[in-house]
Image (cartoon, helix red, strand yellow):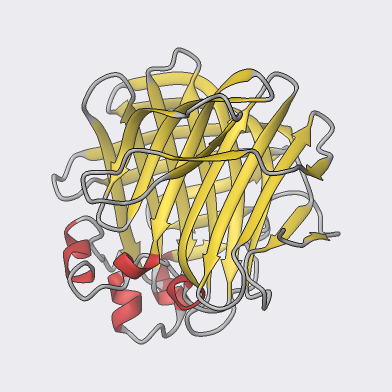
Amino acid sequence: MVQLSSDQSARGPGFDAAVGGDGGYVWWYVDALSDDGQHGLTLIAFIGSVFSPYYAWSGWQDPFQHCAINVALYRLNRSGGRWAMTERRADVLERSTSHFTLGPSSLSWTDGCLNIAIREICAPVPFPLTGSIRLIPEIETEASFDLDPLGRHRWRPLAPRARVELAFTQPDLSWNGAGYFDTNSGTEPLERAFAHWHWGRAHRGEDLRLFYDVINRDGPRLATYLRVDRTGKVDKVEPVAGHQLSGTFWGIDRYAWADQATTPRVIKTLEDTPFYARSALTSALDGEPVIMMHETLNLDRLKSPFVRPLLPFRMPRRFF
Protein backbone atom coordinates (compact mmCIF):
# COMPACT_ATOMS: atom_id res chain seq x y z
CA MET A 1 0.00 0.00 0.00
CA VAL A 2 1.11 3.57 -0.64
CA GLN A 3 2.07 5.47 2.48
CA LEU A 4 -0.44 8.04 3.71
CA SER A 5 1.16 11.13 5.17
CA SER A 6 -0.15 14.20 6.93
CA ASP A 7 0.02 17.57 5.21
CA GLN A 8 -0.49 20.47 7.56
CA SER A 9 -0.70 23.16 4.91
CA ALA A 10 -3.91 25.15 4.55
CA ARG A 11 -6.64 23.65 2.45
CA GLY A 12 -6.82 24.88 -1.09
CA PRO A 13 -4.95 24.12 -4.30
CA GLY A 14 -1.64 25.84 -3.48
CA PHE A 15 -1.06 27.16 -7.00
CA ASP A 16 2.32 28.51 -5.85
CA ALA A 17 3.59 24.99 -5.11
CA ALA A 18 7.29 24.40 -5.68
CA VAL A 19 8.25 22.57 -8.87
CA GLY A 20 11.27 20.35 -8.47
CA GLY A 21 14.05 20.93 -10.96
CA ASP A 22 14.51 19.71 -14.51
CA GLY A 23 11.95 17.03 -15.32
CA GLY A 24 9.75 18.19 -12.45
CA TYR A 25 6.05 18.88 -12.73
CA VAL A 26 2.89 19.79 -10.87
CA TRP A 27 -0.67 19.57 -12.13
CA TRP A 28 -4.17 20.32 -10.87
CA TYR A 29 -6.94 18.05 -12.15
CA VAL A 30 -10.74 18.39 -12.27
CA ASP A 31 -13.28 15.95 -13.63
CA ALA A 32 -17.07 15.87 -13.55
CA LEU A 33 -20.08 13.97 -14.90
CA SER A 34 -23.42 15.72 -15.42
CA ASP A 35 -26.41 14.77 -13.30
CA ASP A 36 -28.34 13.67 -16.39
CA GLY A 37 -25.56 11.31 -17.50
CA GLN A 38 -25.17 13.05 -20.85
CA HIS A 39 -21.95 15.02 -20.42
CA GLY A 40 -18.46 14.86 -18.96
CA LEU A 41 -15.54 17.17 -18.34
CA THR A 42 -11.83 16.98 -17.56
CA LEU A 43 -9.45 19.86 -16.98
CA ILE A 44 -5.73 19.71 -16.14
CA ALA A 45 -3.50 22.73 -15.49
CA PHE A 46 0.20 21.85 -15.83
CA ILE A 47 3.55 23.36 -14.94
CA GLY A 48 6.02 21.03 -16.59
CA SER A 49 3.50 19.31 -18.84
CA VAL A 50 4.23 15.60 -18.41
CA PHE A 51 2.82 14.73 -21.85
CA SER A 52 4.61 17.52 -23.69
CA PRO A 53 6.83 16.40 -26.57
CA TYR A 54 8.56 19.80 -26.40
CA TYR A 55 9.48 19.28 -22.73
CA ALA A 56 10.89 15.83 -23.53
CA TRP A 57 12.81 17.09 -26.57
CA SER A 58 14.34 19.86 -24.43
CA GLY A 59 15.93 17.20 -22.24
CA TRP A 60 13.38 17.96 -19.51
CA GLN A 61 14.84 21.42 -18.91
CA ASP A 62 12.90 24.15 -17.08
CA PRO A 63 9.31 23.01 -16.39
CA PHE A 64 8.09 26.63 -16.38
CA GLN A 65 8.73 26.87 -20.12
CA HIS A 66 6.27 24.01 -20.68
CA CYS A 67 2.91 24.94 -19.14
CA ALA A 68 -0.52 24.02 -20.44
CA ILE A 69 -4.22 23.89 -19.63
CA ASN A 70 -5.97 20.85 -21.06
CA VAL A 71 -9.77 21.08 -21.34
CA ALA A 72 -12.03 18.33 -22.66
CA LEU A 73 -15.83 18.36 -22.98
CA TYR A 74 -17.44 14.98 -23.62
CA ARG A 75 -20.80 13.69 -24.78
CA LEU A 76 -21.42 10.33 -23.17
CA ASN A 77 -24.34 9.11 -25.28
CA ARG A 78 -23.29 10.33 -28.70
CA SER A 79 -20.24 11.46 -30.61
CA GLY A 80 -18.80 14.93 -30.41
CA GLY A 81 -17.20 17.19 -27.84
CA ARG A 82 -14.31 19.64 -27.68
CA TRP A 83 -10.64 19.18 -26.72
CA ALA A 84 -7.86 21.74 -26.30
CA MET A 85 -4.31 21.61 -24.93
CA THR A 86 -2.03 24.49 -25.87
CA GLU A 87 1.45 24.73 -24.40
CA ARG A 88 2.77 28.14 -23.33
CA ARG A 89 5.92 29.63 -21.81
CA ALA A 90 6.71 31.09 -18.41
CA ASP A 91 6.24 34.68 -19.54
CA VAL A 92 2.44 34.17 -19.78
CA LEU A 93 2.19 32.34 -16.45
CA GLU A 94 1.10 34.18 -13.29
CA ARG A 95 0.40 32.41 -10.02
CA SER A 96 -0.07 32.85 -6.31
CA THR A 97 -1.37 30.58 -3.56
CA SER A 98 -4.94 31.03 -4.80
CA HIS A 99 -4.58 32.05 -8.45
CA PHE A 100 -3.20 30.47 -11.64
CA THR A 101 -3.31 32.30 -14.98
CA LEU A 102 -1.84 30.90 -18.18
CA GLY A 103 -2.36 33.02 -21.27
CA PRO A 104 -6.09 33.69 -21.70
CA SER A 105 -7.34 31.10 -19.16
CA SER A 106 -7.26 31.06 -15.37
CA LEU A 107 -8.08 29.14 -12.19
CA SER A 108 -8.76 30.91 -8.89
CA TRP A 109 -9.61 29.68 -5.39
CA THR A 110 -12.11 32.15 -3.88
CA ASP A 111 -14.25 31.72 -0.77
CA GLY A 112 -13.49 28.02 -0.69
CA CYS A 113 -14.49 27.35 -4.32
CA LEU A 114 -12.53 26.83 -7.52
CA ASN A 115 -13.50 29.23 -10.32
CA ILE A 116 -12.15 28.52 -13.81
CA ALA A 117 -12.32 30.79 -16.86
CA ILE A 118 -11.50 29.17 -20.20
CA ARG A 119 -10.59 30.86 -23.49
CA GLU A 120 -8.80 28.26 -25.60
CA ILE A 121 -8.62 27.04 -29.19
CA CYS A 122 -9.12 23.36 -29.97
CA ALA A 123 -6.71 21.27 -32.02
CA PRO A 124 -6.33 19.95 -34.62
CA VAL A 125 -9.63 21.60 -35.75
CA PRO A 126 -9.48 25.19 -34.41
CA PHE A 127 -12.89 25.46 -32.74
CA PRO A 128 -13.11 28.10 -29.99
CA LEU A 129 -13.59 26.87 -26.42
CA THR A 130 -14.94 29.59 -24.12
CA GLY A 131 -16.73 29.35 -20.81
CA SER A 132 -16.59 28.99 -17.05
CA ILE A 133 -16.47 26.15 -14.55
CA ARG A 134 -17.20 26.44 -10.84
CA LEU A 135 -16.26 23.64 -8.44
CA ILE A 136 -17.81 23.74 -4.96
CA PRO A 137 -16.18 21.19 -2.61
CA GLU A 138 -18.45 18.91 -0.60
CA ILE A 139 -15.52 17.01 0.94
CA GLU A 140 -11.93 18.25 1.39
CA THR A 141 -8.93 16.31 2.62
CA GLU A 142 -5.35 17.08 3.63
CA ALA A 143 -4.11 13.56 2.87
CA SER A 144 -1.17 13.01 0.54
CA PHE A 145 0.35 9.84 -0.88
CA ASP A 146 3.71 8.83 -2.29
CA LEU A 147 3.24 6.97 -5.57
CA ASP A 148 6.77 5.58 -5.79
CA PRO A 149 9.16 3.98 -3.25
CA LEU A 150 11.52 6.99 -3.29
CA GLY A 151 8.85 9.59 -2.63
CA ARG A 152 9.53 11.55 -5.81
CA HIS A 153 5.92 11.53 -7.01
CA ARG A 154 3.00 12.59 -4.84
CA TRP A 155 -0.79 12.65 -5.14
CA ARG A 156 -3.17 14.77 -3.07
CA PRO A 157 -6.98 14.33 -3.39
CA LEU A 158 -7.88 17.91 -2.44
CA ALA A 159 -11.67 17.84 -2.93
CA PRO A 160 -12.55 14.29 -3.96
CA ARG A 161 -16.26 15.06 -3.86
CA ALA A 162 -17.66 18.33 -5.23
CA ARG A 163 -20.45 19.95 -7.16
CA VAL A 164 -19.56 21.38 -10.55
CA GLU A 165 -21.40 24.09 -12.48
CA LEU A 166 -20.43 24.46 -16.14
CA ALA A 167 -21.50 27.32 -18.42
CA PHE A 168 -19.93 27.66 -21.88
CA THR A 169 -20.76 30.02 -24.72
CA GLN A 170 -18.57 28.22 -27.27
CA PRO A 171 -20.00 25.66 -27.54
CA ASP A 172 -23.40 26.65 -26.12
CA LEU A 173 -23.54 24.27 -23.18
CA SER A 174 -24.45 24.33 -19.50
CA TRP A 175 -24.95 21.62 -16.90
CA ASN A 176 -24.41 20.73 -13.23
CA GLY A 177 -22.91 17.52 -11.93
CA ALA A 178 -20.72 15.60 -9.51
CA GLY A 179 -17.02 16.42 -9.60
CA TYR A 180 -13.55 15.70 -8.27
CA PHE A 181 -10.38 17.79 -7.72
CA ASP A 182 -6.81 16.66 -7.00
CA THR A 183 -3.17 17.57 -7.58
CA ASN A 184 -0.04 15.58 -8.48
CA SER A 185 3.59 16.63 -8.34
CA GLY A 186 6.98 15.10 -8.98
CA THR A 187 10.69 15.83 -9.25
CA GLU A 188 11.40 13.74 -12.35
CA PRO A 189 9.55 12.73 -15.56
CA LEU A 190 6.71 10.26 -15.02
CA GLU A 191 8.18 7.82 -17.52
CA ARG A 192 11.39 7.55 -15.50
CA ALA A 193 9.54 6.15 -12.47
CA PHE A 194 6.50 4.33 -13.86
CA ALA A 195 5.69 1.84 -16.57
CA HIS A 196 1.92 1.86 -16.24
CA TRP A 197 -0.90 3.01 -13.97
CA HIS A 198 -4.65 2.69 -13.52
CA TRP A 199 -6.68 5.25 -11.59
CA GLY A 200 -10.36 5.53 -10.74
CA ARG A 201 -12.81 7.43 -8.58
CA ALA A 202 -16.39 6.49 -7.75
CA HIS A 203 -18.93 8.44 -5.69
CA ARG A 204 -21.22 6.32 -3.51
CA GLY A 205 -24.20 7.41 -1.45
CA GLU A 206 -22.41 8.35 1.78
CA ASP A 207 -18.78 8.03 0.81
CA LEU A 208 -16.50 7.72 -2.19
CA ARG A 209 -13.79 5.36 -3.33
CA LEU A 210 -10.43 6.19 -4.87
CA PHE A 211 -8.12 3.75 -6.63
CA TYR A 212 -4.51 4.23 -7.73
CA ASP A 213 -2.69 1.14 -9.01
CA VAL A 214 0.89 1.97 -10.03
CA ILE A 215 3.45 -0.28 -11.72
CA ASN A 216 6.88 1.12 -10.88
CA ARG A 217 9.95 0.55 -13.03
CA ASP A 218 11.97 -0.21 -9.90
CA GLY A 219 10.42 -1.55 -6.74
CA PRO A 220 7.06 -3.13 -5.97
CA ARG A 221 3.72 -2.50 -7.55
CA LEU A 222 1.97 0.05 -5.31
CA ALA A 223 -1.80 0.07 -4.95
CA THR A 224 -3.91 2.58 -3.02
CA TYR A 225 -7.55 1.77 -2.24
CA LEU A 226 -9.29 4.46 -0.20
CA ARG A 227 -12.65 5.23 1.36
CA VAL A 228 -13.39 8.91 2.06
CA ASP A 229 -16.42 9.67 4.22
CA ARG A 230 -18.55 12.81 4.38
CA THR A 231 -16.30 14.38 7.02
CA GLY A 232 -13.18 14.03 4.86
CA LYS A 233 -11.79 11.12 6.88
CA VAL A 234 -9.59 8.95 4.64
CA ASP A 235 -9.22 5.22 5.33
CA LYS A 236 -7.34 2.55 3.49
CA VAL A 237 -9.59 -0.35 2.53
CA GLU A 238 -8.91 -3.90 1.48
CA PRO A 239 -8.53 -4.34 -2.28
CA VAL A 240 -11.71 -5.19 -4.13
CA ALA A 241 -11.66 -7.52 -7.11
CA GLY A 242 -9.72 -6.34 -10.14
CA HIS A 243 -11.20 -6.89 -13.58
CA GLN A 244 -9.65 -6.69 -17.02
CA LEU A 245 -11.73 -4.47 -19.30
CA SER A 246 -11.92 -4.60 -23.05
CA GLY A 247 -8.94 -3.11 -24.82
CA THR A 248 -9.06 0.21 -26.62
CA PHE A 249 -8.65 0.90 -30.33
CA TRP A 250 -4.92 1.46 -29.67
CA GLY A 251 -4.62 -1.70 -27.61
CA ILE A 252 -4.29 -0.07 -24.18
CA ASP A 253 -5.01 -2.57 -21.38
CA ARG A 254 -7.60 -1.31 -18.90
CA TYR A 255 -8.03 -2.65 -15.38
CA ALA A 256 -10.79 -1.60 -12.98
CA TRP A 257 -12.40 -2.56 -9.68
CA ALA A 258 -15.75 -4.00 -8.60
CA ASP A 259 -17.38 -6.42 -6.20
CA GLN A 260 -16.40 -10.03 -6.84
CA ALA A 261 -19.70 -10.90 -8.48
CA THR A 262 -19.75 -7.79 -10.69
CA THR A 263 -17.92 -7.01 -13.91
CA PRO A 264 -17.30 -3.32 -14.68
CA ARG A 265 -18.72 -2.16 -17.99
CA VAL A 266 -17.45 0.64 -20.20
CA ILE A 267 -20.14 3.25 -20.80
CA LYS A 268 -17.90 5.18 -23.17
CA THR A 269 -14.22 5.51 -23.91
CA LEU A 270 -13.76 9.27 -23.64
CA GLU A 271 -10.09 9.45 -24.67
CA ASP A 272 -8.49 6.77 -26.84
CA THR A 273 -4.86 7.52 -27.67
CA PRO A 274 -1.77 5.35 -28.25
CA PHE A 275 -0.64 5.87 -24.63
CA TYR A 276 -3.67 7.00 -22.63
CA ALA A 277 -7.31 6.03 -22.19
CA ARG A 278 -10.03 7.77 -20.18
CA SER A 279 -13.32 5.97 -19.69
CA ALA A 280 -16.66 6.27 -17.93
CA LEU A 281 -17.62 2.93 -16.35
CA THR A 282 -20.46 1.31 -14.47
CA SER A 283 -19.43 -0.83 -11.52
CA ALA A 284 -20.57 -1.94 -8.05
CA LEU A 285 -18.79 -1.42 -4.73
CA ASP A 286 -20.08 -2.96 -1.51
CA GLY A 287 -23.29 -3.84 -3.29
CA GLU A 288 -23.98 -0.30 -4.51
CA PRO A 289 -24.04 0.56 -8.23
CA VAL A 290 -21.61 3.37 -9.08
CA ILE A 291 -20.41 5.38 -12.04
CA MET A 292 -16.62 5.45 -12.17
CA MET A 293 -14.28 7.85 -13.90
CA HIS A 294 -11.26 5.81 -14.95
CA GLU A 295 -7.90 6.33 -16.61
CA THR A 296 -5.06 4.15 -17.84
CA LEU A 297 -1.63 5.56 -18.66
CA ASN A 298 1.04 3.53 -20.47
CA LEU A 299 4.40 5.30 -20.10
CA ASP A 300 6.28 2.92 -22.39
CA ARG A 301 3.95 3.98 -25.17
CA LEU A 302 4.29 7.67 -24.30
CA LYS A 303 8.08 7.67 -24.60
CA SER A 304 8.04 5.69 -27.84
CA PRO A 305 9.81 7.51 -30.71
CA PHE A 306 6.81 6.61 -32.87
CA VAL A 307 4.27 8.30 -30.57
CA ARG A 308 5.91 11.56 -29.49
CA PRO A 309 6.17 13.03 -33.03
CA LEU A 310 2.37 12.70 -33.34
CA LEU A 311 1.57 14.79 -30.26
CA PRO A 312 2.10 18.34 -31.64
CA PHE A 313 -0.99 17.85 -33.81
CA ARG A 314 -3.09 17.77 -30.62
CA MET A 315 -0.76 19.83 -28.38
CA PRO A 316 0.39 22.96 -30.25
CA ARG A 317 2.88 25.34 -28.63
CA ARG A 318 2.24 29.09 -28.67
CA PHE A 319 4.13 32.12 -27.39
CA PHE A 320 1.15 34.12 -26.10
Q: With respect to residue 140, does 33 lie above or below?
A: above
In front: 156, or 119?
156
Residue at image position (57%, 24%) is 261
Percent x, y of residue 172: 30, 22
Image point 40% across, 83% down: which residue? Answer: 60
Q: Is residue 26 visible?
A: no
Q: Is residue 61 left or right of residue 225?
A: left
- Taking 247 as reference, is 172 above or below it? above
Tell me residue 214's x, y (percent): 55, 60
| Residue at 68% over, 44% down | 239
Left or right of 22 in this view: 312: left
Closest to the observer: 26 or 272?
272
- Screen quadrant of the N terminus: bottom right
Q: Position of residue 246 (x, y in %)?
A: 33, 38
User: Please, which residue is most extreme toward the left here?
Assistant: 125
Q: Quadrant of the C terminus?
A: bottom left
Query: Which residue lies at the image location 66% right of the left edge and 32% below the top edge?
Result: 161
| Position of residue 210 measured from the top left corner of the image (x, y, whole percent) | 64, 41
Outermost residue on the front side: it is: 261
Q: Nearer the viewer, residue 81 or 105?
A: 81
Whether residue 195 sits left or right of residue 200 in the image: it is left
Image-quadrant location for residue 62:
bottom left
Can I make out residue 295 in this image?
yes
Q: Report the label total.
A: 0
Image side of residue 276 versus residue 217, left or right: left
